[in-house]
Amino acid sequence: MERGSQNDEYDDGVMTVEQMEILRKQIAIYAVICGQLVSLHESLSSKFPLSSGMHPTGGGYFDPMVASPSTYKISHRHRWTPTSMQLQILESIYEEGSGTPKPQRIEEITLELSQHGQVMEKNVYNWFQNRRARSKRKQPQAMTTMTVQTVDATVTTEERSYGDSGGFESYDHLLFPSNDFSNILKYNLSFSHMILLCAFGYCIVFFGIWKFYLGWFMVILFN
Amino acid sequence: MERGSQNDEYDDGVMTVEQMEILRKQIAIYAVICGQLVSLHESLSSKFPLSSGMHPTGGGYFDPMVASPSTYKISHRHRWTPTSMQLQILESIYEEGSGTPKPQRIEEITLELSQHGQVMEKNVYNWFQNRRARSKRKQPQAMTTMTVQTVDATVTTEERSYGDSGGFESYDHLLFPSNDFSNILKYNLSFSHMILLCAFGYCIVFFGIWKFYLGWFMVILFN
DNA sequence: GGAATATGAATGAAAG
DNA sequence: CTTTCATTCATATTCC
């Protein structure tokens, strides 16, 4: 009703400017609070509208603790995580590939990956998108510390003024040079193991053949 | 305060699902009302800016997204983000509309949206483009894959560690089906090739050793 | 157990 | 319009 009176007063021009200012400040404060409430609600319901009920993936902001008495337990993992095997395949495809996420080949890859765990085409698509974007961002890590400092110095207070929460993500690759090598090694470890296994096998093979000829040589020698 | 009690109940698992749902609906209603209040205040303040207490960088009065408690950078947002109210309007227009982004109606929509925050025609145009393109991708939903079901069945209720992502509840995988089984065989073939390669190597190894002993045996025999 | 990091996912914007 | 890129958000994981 305050709003109504405000409008009336405002339309009639009876309310003084000071009153108007005070009222508006009050509404401003309310607006801030309500905006936060809206944000809170949005984040909690996480874009699952009420009308459609709970999202099939479970969650919402309900924890499995609450949902546990239900018939089947819904895993509260909302996000796909590739299996190590899937990751290997993806990495190999990524490296071999022309660097372009295939348009329709995604389907094939998905099918191939589905042998080693649940996966959607969307997951594969996202993976390639992210993989490429993030490997591209890690290229300028070759810059020396001097350069990093220089670039960082060019970031004036204008940028810092609103970047107190950690700075722009755009500069993270400069401030936090990555250790991509370790990740690659980690991902390809078992694959390298296979290669080593084969190599080891062939070494033994040749050693055996050598021993074979040694045996024949000794046969001839002792004859 | 209500939130506090909610959290307590929620943490203890005392609140029932029904209560939770009721509370959620209440908050939703409050959110809608508050969103309208915010919009009203924005439109008011855009005409009569506050002499004090206004955000220095805000274009209009203030952006509810920016005002979220999460310590986020305040403006200088490089890319437009529709406010909740704008999104609501856009969604309604999208659903009602013939699905075609109107050539000149964009201007009207832009004008309508500008009541709830800064927006350009380009933004509206892009939004409709993206909205349509992405909703189209979810049309070809059809068959499910047998592999997914199989894999899903093998997953137990045990806590899933890193890399074991199979079996999480999601119906979205139905949206991206894959129907080509030849690729599975193709991959299994190459993997089997490696195994066979190793096995073959070891066979040769043992064969070599056997030949080695054969040689020695012949040496002894001929002596 | 909390901050730092890694990464899957969403989406605005632009290229083709 | 379709595809791709860039940025950002949310969550899982790791390390101290």
Image (tube, coloured by chain):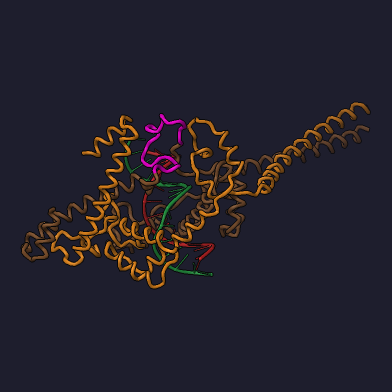
Chain colours: A brown, B orange, C green, D red
The residue positioned 66% from the left and 48% from the top of the image is: B183
Q: Is residue B80 left or right of residue B38?
A: right
* In the image, residue A69 lies in the stretch drawn in magenta: yes
The residue positioned 40% from the left and 56% from the top of the image is: A174
Image position of A64 with respect to B55: above or below = above
Image position of B79 with respect to B197: above or below = below
The quarter of the image holding the C terminus of chain A is: top right
The residue positioned 75% from the left and 39% from the top of the image is: B201
Give the prevailing secondary structure in the magenta stretch: loop
Q: Which percent across, then down, holds residue B91?
A: 38, 58
Image position of B189 with respect to B61: above or below = above
Of B33 and A93, which appears nearest the observer?
A: B33
Q: Which percent across, then down, holds residue B173?
A: 53, 46
Q: Residue furthest bottom?
A: B104
Residue A147 showing in the rendered view? no
Of B209 and A89, which appears nearest the observer?
A: A89
Of B81 and A184, which appears nearest the observer?
A: B81
- What span is colored magenta in the figure? A53-74
* In the image, residue A11 lies in the stretch drawn in magenta: no
